[in-house]
Amino acid sequence: MGIVAEVFNLTTGIISAIGYPGIFGLMLLEGMLLPIPSEVVMAFGGYLIYTGQLTGFLYVPAFLILLLVGTFGNLSGAMIAYYIGYYGGEPLIVRYGKYVFLDEASVKHVQRWFQKYGPESVFGTRLVPIFRTFISIPAGIGKMNIRLFASLTFLGSLIWDSVLIYFGISLGRNWQKIILFFDQYQYVAIGAIIVLVGLFFINKLAKKRTGNSVQ
């Protein structure tokens, strides 16, 4: 809990001190696989809109500014992670991944997921805590089309950030409840992924048996 509390305090402190630039920087770091919780960054940003500490500019509402700043920050970090995978490949991850709490087994697990589901996995995992940042490196290693990667990453992050900001504003001073909610959502999402993978293999096996019986 000590480390979690320190990360929480550091994150909210940076945002309180410098506002939108802090949000962009933190979301960029999260996109690069550093342990920065987007749930805290964007929900706290929504709370600051609620209190009036984050405001709009000219005719652009604060919600839209926060959404774009957070999403482009996350996209920027994801692009860096993508190119790390593209040019560095697995050897670089094996050697230096431990410094960002990333081990070889985790990368290989997500890489297998990417190889099976390709572009769909880039979009889908952006909506799942933990997995949402890991997919960038396997996409880079797999030499995924960069425009498609950027588009799916932006769209998935846009949806994720919109939900977080909405809850941050709606919950107001109780915005921290969203962290507990997404902790539970995380396990539900992982469970759903496991079920979908299981159904995929069951369906594949059934088709194989049908093909053999026809022969």
Image (tube, grey):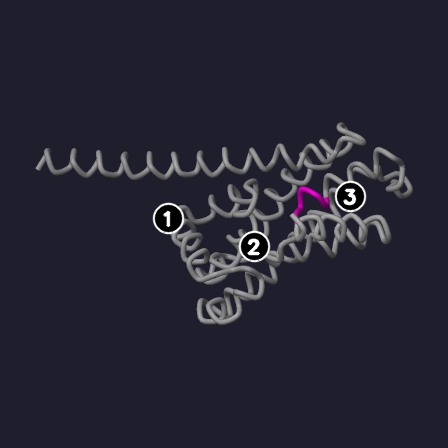
* CA distance for labels 1 and 3: 34 Å
**Are the residues at dot 3 and dot 2 in contact (C-beta closer than 8 Å)?**
no
In the picture, residue 195 is in which quadrant?
A: top left
Q: Residues within 10 Å of mark 2 (few under 14, many from 20)?
A: few
Name the residue beneath numbered marker 2. Answer: 147
Looking at the image, residue 40 sits to the left or right of residue 172; the answer is: left
**Are the residues at dot 1 and dot 3 in contact (C-beta closer than 8 Å)?**
no
* CA distance for labels 2 and 1: 20 Å
* Amino acid type indicated by mark 3: Leu
Which residue appears at 87% of the width and 35% of the height? 51
Q: Is residue 40 magenta?
A: yes
Dot 1: element = helix
Front residue (pair 114, 109): 109
Front residue (pair 70, 98): 98
Dot 2: element = helix
Q: Residues within 10 Å of mark 3 (few under 14, many from 20)?
A: many
Q: Which of the two labelled residues, at mark 1 and mark 3, occupies the earlier sequence position?
A: 3
Name the residue beneath numbered marker 1. Answer: 116
Name the residue beneath numbered marker 3. Answer: 66
